[in-house]
């Protein structure tokens, strides 16, 4: 089984390589970042989501579960991208729609292929088609969560 922290860091690097996505982060690529659990300093994902600046994208590991792919037992790694969009004046506002599209269809400069076809980790297939859902934090503020899954090609 691969180390999910490597998968997360690779994903962050690729997302930072999508010029239009960085533009949506007010031109600051560090606004796309990883959340790694570090007990006791970093042990509450809920707090980390609440503290996210706008705009930003935080990538976190949700878990790993066994699965099946072509009759073979595999590991499926579930990640979430937590989105806070920048302030927009467009009518209708498109910030979250645009972020979701760029996450799935954006082209990192280092790869030349859309994220939907990108090899984020050499031991994983490209991401499964993602989903996006509205969530609400502890203060009642809305944000969006993009759920991604990566299937390992074998058991490393």
Image (cartoon, helix red, strand yellow):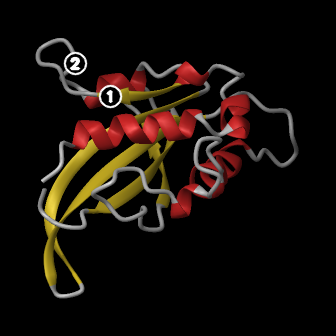
The residue lying furthest to the bottom in this view is 71
Give the secondary structure at mark 2.
Answer: loop
Residue labelled with disc 2: 42
Q: Position of residue 3 (x, y in %)?
A: 18, 42
Q: Position of residue 139 (x, y in %)?
A: 43, 26
Of the 4 image quadrants, the one containing the N terminus is bottom left
Question: Residue 39 is drawn in which quadrant?
Answer: top left
Image vertical order of residue 125 relative to residue 106, above or below: below
Locate residue 12 relative to residue 115 in the image: left or right. Answer: left
Locate residue 54 relative to residue 127 in the image: left or right. Answer: right
**What residue is shown at x 40% (from left), y 39% (from top)?**
10
Question: Looking at the image, which is closer to me, 54 or 29?
Answer: 29
Residue labelled with disc 1: 35
**What residue is shown at x 47% (from left), y 62% (from top)?**
130
Of the 4 image quadrants, the one containing the C terminus is bottom left
Question: Looking at the image, which is closer to me, 120 or 96?
Answer: 120
């Amino acid at each position: 089984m691969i180390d999910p922290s490597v998968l997360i860091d690779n994903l962050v690097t690729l997302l930072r390589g999508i010029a239009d996505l960085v533009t949506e982060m007010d031109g600051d690529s560090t606004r796309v970042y990883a959340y790694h659990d570090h007990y006791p300093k970093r042990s509450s994902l809920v707090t980390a989501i609440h503290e996210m600046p706008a705009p930003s994208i935080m990538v976190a590991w949700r878990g790993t579960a066994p699965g099946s792919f072509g009759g073979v037992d595999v590991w499926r790694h579930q990640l979430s991208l937590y989105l806070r969009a920048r302030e927009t004046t467009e009518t209708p506002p498109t910030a979250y729609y645009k972020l979701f599209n760029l996450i799935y269809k954006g082209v990192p400069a280092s790869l030349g292929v859309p994220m939907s076809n990108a090899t984020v980790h050499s031991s994983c297939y490209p991401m499964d088609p993602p989903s996006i859902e509205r969530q609400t934090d502890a203060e009642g503020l809305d944000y969006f969560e993009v759920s991604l899954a990566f299937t390992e090609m074998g058991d490393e």
